[in-house]
Amino acid sequence: MKAETPEGITLIRNGLFDNGDYGSTYLVGHDQLALVDPGTSYSVPVLLEWFEEHSLSLSNLKYILLTHIHLDHAGAAGHLVEKLPNLKVYLHRKGAPHLRDPAELLESVREATGDRFSEYGEFKPIPEENLETIGGEKTFNIGSKEIVAFPTPGHAPHHLAYYDNETGGLFPGDSAGLYLGGRLIPSTPPPTFNLEKSLDSLTRMKESNPSILLYPHFGPGENPGELIDDYKRKLRDWVEQVDKLRSRYEEEEKLVTEIIETKRDWIRNGFSVEELKMNIRGVLKYFSWREDDQK
Ligand SMILES: [Zn+2]
């Protein structure tokens, strides 16, 4: 049986990259409502239609919770704020300048995604007064529901996880990896993936003792403690594999070809070769700045 979302939390398939099982946005709350990671600008009509189909008034939507500002999570936020000017957008303090003025963010996405840049949609800046920034751990309310946000750097330095005090449901964002078709796949994109910080964040998430993990790619995962431990192993193995092979190949292209051959089993459920290349570049970047640091 497939895992279900807890009370007061609903999964909406946001249609990310035209795939029904790749991007999940969660609707959270009883009286007032929040959306966790609304997806790209292409998700906006999908979400609006969902509200209409379920006879829910958009006026109940008061908050957006962003685990991080990568466009497949945050790209829809500015469009929703334009529709609902009182909407409050929670995010990590470090991400806020990039949502007010996205030039640098868009450049970094363009560099990371190459040919697939257009699939990340159109970004709209978000006015300062709509942003609710979070530095350390913070507890706040979505109507009667209490949420605890805490930093989970590693996938990106501006990453947060959100814990629902009522049900123990945890929104780990991308800091607990991708969970596609019941399989965990590392998510290590450039330019700021950091292995040590990722592992520390996974420990912190496990300590929060969640009842279920609500992955943005894709769906609820049961037995969170086991999933988190398993992901730690997978992440370490993945970084180690890239490390071993990068010393064998001087040319990045050959390295990439070799790794793709060994990871054919990852390429399914919406995880593409481009996604894998991004993961490789993220790990290479991590080693390059770590080595620069040691000089
Ligand atoms: Zn991400």
Image (tube, rainbow, N blue to C red):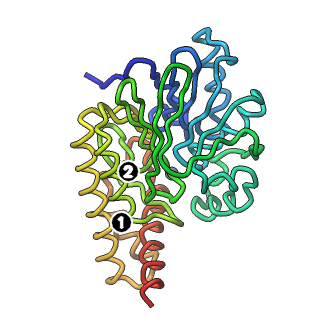
Look at label 2 and name its amino acid: Ile
Q: At 46% across and 75% down in the image, what residue appears?
A: 253
Q: At 45% across and 43% down in the image, what residue appears?
A: 161
Look at label 1 and name its amino acid: Glu
Side (left or right) of 236 relative to 219: left
Q: At 37% across and 65% down in the image, what residue appears?
A: 195
**Is 95 placed above or below 169 here?**
below
Number of residues whose C-alpha sits closer than 10 Å to that of mark 1, classed few (under 14), some (14–19) or many (20 or more): few
Q: Position of residue 256 (x, y in %)?
A: 41, 70
Specify the quadrant of the image occupied by residue 210.
Answer: top left
CA gap between label 2 and label 1 equals: 26 Å
Task: Point out the image quarter for the C terminus.
Answer: bottom left
Q: Nearer the viewer, residue 237 or 277?
A: 237
* Labelled disc at residue 196: 1
Specify the quadrant of the image occupied by residue 124.
Answer: top right
Q: Which of 184 and 58 is in front in this view?
A: 58
Judged from this view, the residue extending furthest toward the top is 55
Q: At 59% across and 19% down in the image, what residue appears?
A: 32
Report which residue position mark 2 lands on: 267
- The answer to which of marks 2 and 1 sits earlier in the sequence is 1
Q: Nearer the viewer, residue 188 or 142?
A: 142
Helix, strand or loop at mark 1: helix
**Is 174 placed above or below 283 here?**
above
Whether pointer 2 and pointer 1 mark residues with C-beta atoms closer than 8 Å, the reply is no
